[in-house]
Amino acid sequence: MTDFVPAARTATRALRELFPETPLQRNDYLSLRYGAEIWLKREDLTPVRSFKLRGAFNAMRKIRERDPSVTRFVCASAGNHAQGMAFSCRHFGVRGTIFMPITTPQQKIAKTKAFGGEWVEVVLTGDYFDRTLAAAKAWCAAEGAYFLAPFDDADVMEGQATVGVEILDQLGHAPDMVVLSVGGGGLSSGVSRYLRDVSPTTEFRFVEPLGGASLKAALQAGHPVQLDEVDSFVDGAAVARLGEKPFADLAWVDPAHVILAPEDRICVTMIDMLNVEGVVLEPAGAMPINALDDIAEEIRGKTVVCVVSGGNFDFERLPEVKERAQRFQGRKKYFILRLPQRPGALRDFLSILGPDDDVARFEYLKKSARNFGSILIGLETTDPANFTRLFAEMEAQGFAYRDITQDATLAEYLI
């Protein structure tokens, strides 16, 4: 047993000053669906609705134990880390300056201020996070404050390991598998490091967003690398570069055990958990559940723990999430139809729609100097097979069309 194990247990006991252990709940719906014992570790039920409070609290606790003169902390964050640090600053009675991008939604700014109260100042700077981060580090150096990193910090990783401590204590035995979401690597490295020491038979699967696969890239290169592009939809895990310290603890991972979850598929899980279970998850929090489809055959009859990392979801995004889920399931499509400019042409087209086909978008511009006009159409249906029938009928009747559902460039401007 390494020194990391007792340190993680000490951190867990210290955390009880802030909140009780988060629930570990057997989920009947998922267990029946996959023929396994599926348990959800509900980190969406911490006081700040994410696991980030654990790492921020532990780092602040240990820093102040080593040097009580440190009374000023700084971080750069647009979400969960900011809220975890704000909560911790108020708990310890120390000053915190939190740099956030100017584009941060007001809801997240307001929550950060509410958690920190008089102890926290929020500074909005930079349109993009890299500029916000640079401003935070420059201010930190000038003021002599302590920069609290969101994941690339040994004390933060130790704090996230408390999730693993609680899982074993609550379950009472070693799970067969733990499924973890990966962003910068703090949670996945901390939990897997602890459980590998005390529960060596437990397997792991790591889940990244398809548009932010920093762990997969690091494992393939043998070191953390900077991704050229990152899809920011999974904002809690869309990280362009895995942390150096987390990678040191994750270098053993088999790349085949890193699951890449498409962003639109994650939306299906978010809608499913909301409608069926009444559980509100942010995209990163839904990833471990979403990955169960990829490992369905491996987990039959086994005990599997999915760490639900967070539930900070802005409901203004719900229409987008529903839209992306429908598109992934093949139940919603957008296409451009070339319609002859003659009386009755539109009626002819509408007559071939089925009883389950619903027009969700319709834009038509008649141009008198042309023989054909273009229509942007969005259709929803109950069964993807309905589109096969519809398109076959359109072709049979001579209607020319172009499916633009997966055309990212056109969708950005037209949809």
Image: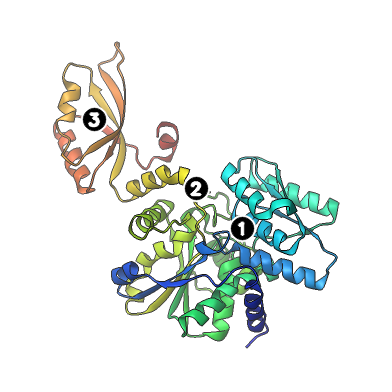
Name the kind of residue labelled 1 in the image. Answer: Arg
**Residue 365 in view of the camera:** yes
Q: Earlier in the sequence, mark 1 or mark 3?
A: 1
Question: Which element type, helix, strand or loop, lies under badge 2?
Answer: loop
In the image, 23 versus 300, the foreground residue is: 23
The reply to whether residue 222 is in sight is no
Disc 3 residue type (three-letter): Ala
Which numbered circle lies on residue 314?
A: 2
Q: Quadrant of residue 246?
A: bottom right
Q: At which x and y percent is residue 111?
A: 60, 50
Q: In this view, does 279 lie above or below 104?
A: below
Q: Which amino acid does label 2 sit on?
A: Asp
Q: Which one is earlier in the sequence, the residue at label 2 or at label 1? A: 1
Report crowding for label 1: few under 14, some 14 to 19, many 20 or more residues within 10 A (C-alpha): many
Does residue 258 lie above or below 274 as drawn? below
Tell me the element at label 1. loop
Query: Picture coordinates of residue 132 (x, y %)?
Result: 69, 46
The foreground one among 53 and 245 is 53
Label 2 – label 1 distance at C-alpha: 25 Å
Rendered residue at 61%/55% (across/down) = 226
Query: Residue under circle 1?
Result: 241
| Position of the C terminus by quadrant | top left
Q: Which residue lies at the image location 40% right of the left edge and 51% below the top edge?
A: 264
| Residues marked 1 and 3 touching at CB (< 8 Å) | no
Asked if labels 1 and 2 touch by Cβ distance under 8 angstroms, the answer is no
User: Regarding mark 3 in the picture, which secondary structure is present there?
Assistant: strand
CB of mark 3 within 8 Å of CB of mark 2? no
Q: Would you name the residue on which mark 3 appears?
A: 400
Q: Position of residue 403 (x, y in %)?
A: 30, 38
Q: Which residue is drawn at 66% across and 75% down?
A: 14
Mark 3 neighbour density, 10 Å: few (under 14) some (14–19) many (20 or more): some
Q: Which of marks 3 and 2 is in front?
A: 2
